[in-house]
């Protein structure tokens, strides 16, 4: 109820502030018998971690994860999996000077007014540091999805500022720090980041998630549609301001004759829907896009108010990304994986054993 | 779990198919003592109802709602409110010819594969007819929000095809069938609808929701952010393919110095955020946009497969809207109202009595 | 949240007051393809209904149930099942004289203080009339459990006042109005009821539920143990004041060497545990007992207070059972069936496909 | 869904096995601004801990709790509270010899069959060690209840074997290891324990919980009644086989004229109901009883089967309590406190501001 849990059957509950002792989460409902080690989580944790490139924040978060329960002799036991990541690189004193000032574009003011007090160090619970646990939990979901269904969840940065990137080569995403699929765009991206650093400014980004090998039938009418739950999960990522499924906002100016994806025995002719029809997966690739705002943690001074309601100036120094969107790629994958596994298990609960003579197209 | 419920404290659970005996819902968790009659629901039910204009489907759904419980002597009692709307204008035989064919762009194929059987009449559970109950439940939420907090939830159609509409005059939305705020655009909208009818085609639309007088503090970290729950609720509406909060996808090409909304003692200078910071309402207007796809129920024939997996042709005759987006205006308002009331009650549960010396800006 | 829902995957949400227009419920999460008609529900609805014998209340509740959704051509579709039972025999004027007085032993005072207002007619939402929908929903659960797993849920009245009844002959429960398994006790039961009627008084009862053919493995650690969920469901029945699993309170004076049920390849030697170990079904019969208080609706006058807090007298005339426990037999079965089906589906979600070399004992 | 969470608004999710690295839990939904330190938890953690007396198990569990989040400068912040207790005294090798044998009366067989594998060390997730986190979370709930409402949750051991104990002196419970309120019974209890140790056997116990200063109005119709949720919470404690509210099973042989608690302007005349009417607190003391079975971990050999389904003998050596009921006293208090706080917050959500002219009696 208090909002730190996602999922119904595959459930992830997280805790932890930016500058507390540790982040942690409980993954409940993971099927038993899945081979898993901490190493399985590091692939994605490393992709998310700041300080792994010159483009992202220079804070060093070790992100060393420890399983505390739910795994025995290398396998999930079916009971709740507890894990933590200790916070090691905490420079809390950086934040003393802004403890009484609300940073524009941040959750400082809203947390303060909601709770009457707040952990001001580094954004506290509202810090993107929290997403480390999403990535850790998502890695477990990804592994199960891959192993049990062959499902592959991948994302890339499809736009930064006005630089758009096509999904040309997945392999590229492992070779650059932008999760960029098109090597031809790297110079432009690099130039933009350099300019932003020079300006002390930041920029937004768009991430595209593509899921392959999704079985038909995942998603529940009418509120817990697969696309609705994806929208929820993706919009819950820090800084996200928009989510699209399939053609997204382009549908506003499409005609029905253009949009509808015709069915043939060999499959759908097109995929404007993005793999979801009536809230239920169609077996096509699931395609989702998300828009991330430019971070407000920039060195250009701004006006704000303090806890007494007085006008003050503020500069957010610190070690921040000029583009938080870059790091959101593995986070978006994690959220999509969590939603998909949850829906796969929900589907199994109610519909296990359902058969139809109709072949999967 | 099975997905027909939305909300945590203010909970709405719906049932009903397009051509069953009745639609219904249970509204649980409504505070006691709210004056409410069926008449309070008709305002929005009438706005949603097809057949109220030449532009929308000519099916006549009486939408006569009956309260079965939870209301005593004109007031909510705090117990579960049951209500139904009987289906009266059912021409099920229209659907016999397509019972074994999957309409492209519809949920026919996915429901069939998920459940092994389906009520093929008029889309069954996947029909937009289901949204009548959302509007009914939303009307209760709206009334409570207005009375208790002064909150006003309003929406208008901000784009249809390539015709964009600015929010110039709320009064206009009651004078035309497009929920259009700008009288100057009515001729263009009218011409587009006529053309579509002639072509036997359909078009997408964009709806904008604006909520006034929202208290600061609604929304829960980290998954049940207010914006995440709004995205879930709006994406759960039939045909929606995208949701934006505030500047939405425009943030991709914004700079931090432009996007961040500076705070002053007299309020925020701008509202790029759309009224939500860190997932919690800031007290500014909440602004959300949603994109609705063009309906696939058009008279231009298309290819599809039947339940045996064979290629067949299909034409979706019937009485369908060339633009389903028009009717989505009151539905979007209802979903936003349901989410807001739920979060207002959730906030009250945990944070009642919280005080801060900081004035609301 | 507001409490009118039970179950996680197989979910039942109810509404309705004693003297409102109708009772109703939504059954969500029922697997698709189950053959079901209203007639399947009447067996148990008739067993629960007052006025079916000289021993139970003479109010005539027709209990005619109507499916409004979720069932198509005689089969569940997997979508939410809506159903209602109209209230036909409402003598609301009976209650006018006690509208401002709180009946002792009833929920009048607590509802009034909780909500600030209440539907005083016949107990309103707190009336046992509400249990009709539990029985209706339970009948669906029972049918699925029987068909899919062979599970049989049965109950009988094991004690009324000081008359104890052994489970000697299930067939007997269909031949008498006491759900009594032992024909030799009928005269004593009859005599007791006659005496109570003469005295204008009432008596408590104990019900025993026995479930056969339960698969091993249902129930979840650590809070949603099968026995904990059974306790919740049974204690939620009107008038229940105690729940036992297996040996129940007798364990207080048992030794470990006596209580522990030893395992052999041919099965457990004993069943002190009542079929649940560590919160998970062991494959043995599940045995539960519940205690129901004597109804407070008796004709012996009592003292109470009115809404102004003044001392007043009260007599609860009307048509009431001298022993409400009798009617609780099918209600208890229904609640147990709902819990079992919910757990069977939950088990399937997470553990489908789990295999072990260990034979079921 | 997977069962490791309890509560709706005040939510506790736990993890941890007997012999894993650590136990932990997340407390979500705690109101902000509550002063809390680890020391507040030690009072009850110490009462629960084995090895604190000659009568309870000699394992030494340090039970040192660490807050990882949700508390800042000594106050709850309203965000999720993460905490862990490291396991330090793990003698896992003790369990190697029984890893393939199912201990009678334990969850070994059911876990093995449910999950296909299990952490056999010390009961794994099914170990009573898990209850340490319940007590930790319960201590937070207790503090808030006390401070905000003056509610006091206390329990004592009301029976062990055939020795019954009246609630004569709460102060006594702090002076002896039996949580016994009557000093006159200490010799008998002591003698019974000595005899059991000599016999290598164990005994059951009964615990009574009494809650003072409960406001009227907590609890929700119809399934989430306060008594139903208490029954759920108490039955979820290891070894509990029965739960009673108020007069419990004694009501079976009570008459309505005796059971009903008459109301007067100065309060109820009696409290047969145990403080709950219609599932809602009446403002009287809440009284609940629970029965705990004798532990099966005794040194008298028994028959069982192994993972191959063959008959084998088993002796459960180790350091076990002859009466697990003793330690259940603080656990029962914790569970009741968690349920009460959850319902207090739920009540606040929906009914904040409800007023009635009727005085609290």
Image: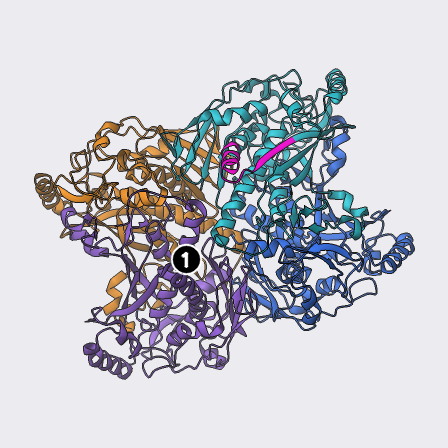
Chain colours: A cyan, B blue, C purple, D orange
Give the percent coordinates (x, y) of residue C206. Answer: 27, 67
Q: Which residues are magenta?
A: A139-155
Give the percent coordinates (x, y) of residue C139. Answer: 42, 67
In the image: residue D355, left or right of residue C224? right
| Marked residue chain, label 1 | C
Residue sitting farthest toward the front: B310
In the image: residue B191, left or right of residue C38? right
Q: Residue at x 65, y 57 (%)?
A: B108
**Splitting the image into 4 quarters, where does residue B257 fall?**
top right
Give the percent coordinates (x, y) of residue A6. Answer: 53, 41
Give the percent coordinates (x, y) of residue A97. Answer: 61, 20
State yes or no: residue D119 in magenta: no
State yes or no: residue A154 in magenta: yes
Element type where label 1 sits in the image: helix
Vertical comparison of A349 with A148: above or below: below
Please name the predominant secondary structure of the magenta segment in the image: helix
Vertical comparison of A356 with C128: above or below: above
Q: Is residue C24 visible?
A: yes
**Splitting the image into 4 quarters, where does residue A229 fall?**
top right
> How busy is the neighbourhood of tag 1: few (under 14 within 10 Å), some, or many (20 plus)?
many
**Splitting the image into 4 quarters, where does residue A135 fall?**
top right
Total numbered labels placed on residues in the image: 1
Nearer-the-camera pick, A243 or D165: A243
In the image: residue C97, left or right of residue D298? right
- Residue occupied by mark 1: C341
Q: Is residue D165 visible?
A: no
Vertical comparison of A351 with D22: above or below: below
């Amino acid at each position: 109820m208090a909002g730190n849990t996602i999922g119904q059957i595959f459930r992830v509950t997280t805790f932890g502030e930016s500058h507390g002792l540790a982040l942690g989460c409980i993954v409940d409902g993971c099927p038993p018998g899945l081979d898993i080690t901490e190493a399985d989580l590091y692939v994605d944790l490393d992709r998310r971690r700041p300080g792994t490139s010159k483009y992202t924040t220079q804070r060093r978060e070790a992100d060393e994860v420890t399983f505390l329960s739910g795994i025995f002799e290398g396998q999930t036991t079916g009971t709740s999996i507890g894990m933590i990541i200790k916070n090691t690189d905490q420079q809390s004193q950086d934040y003393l000077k802004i403890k009484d000032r609300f940073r524009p574009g941040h959750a400082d003011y809203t947390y303060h007014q909601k709770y009457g007090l707040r952990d001001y160090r580094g954004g506290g619970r509202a810090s993107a540091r929290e997403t480390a646990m999403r990535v850790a939990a998502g890695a477990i979901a990804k592994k199960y999805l891959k192993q049990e269904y062959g499902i592959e969840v991948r994302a890339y940065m499809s736009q930064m500022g006005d630089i758009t990137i096509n999904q040309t080569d997945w392999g590229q995403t492992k070779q650059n720090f932008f999760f960029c699929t098109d090597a031809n765009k790297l110079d432009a991206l690099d130039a933009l980041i350099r300019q932003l650093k020079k300006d002390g400014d930041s920029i937004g980004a768009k991430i595209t998630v593509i899921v392959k090998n999704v079985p038909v039938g995942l998603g529940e009418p009418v509120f817990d549609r697969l696309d609705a739950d994806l929208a929820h999960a993706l919009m819950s990522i820090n800084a996200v301001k928009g989510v699209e499924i399939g053609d997204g906002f382009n549908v506003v100016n499409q005609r029905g004759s253009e949009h509808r994806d015709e069915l043939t025995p060999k499959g759908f002719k097109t995929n404007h829907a993005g793999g979801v029809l009536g809230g239920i997966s169609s077996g096509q690739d699931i395609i989702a896009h998300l828009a991330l705002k430019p971070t407000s943690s920039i060195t250009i001074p701004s006006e704000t108010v303090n806890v007494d309601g007085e006008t003050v100036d503020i500069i957010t120094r610190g070690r921040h990304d000029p583009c938080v969107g870059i790091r959101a790629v593995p986070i978006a994958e994690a959220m999509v994986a969590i939603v998909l596994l949850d829906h796969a298990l929900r589907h199994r609960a109610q519909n296990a054993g359902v058969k139809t003579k109709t072949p999967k197209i």
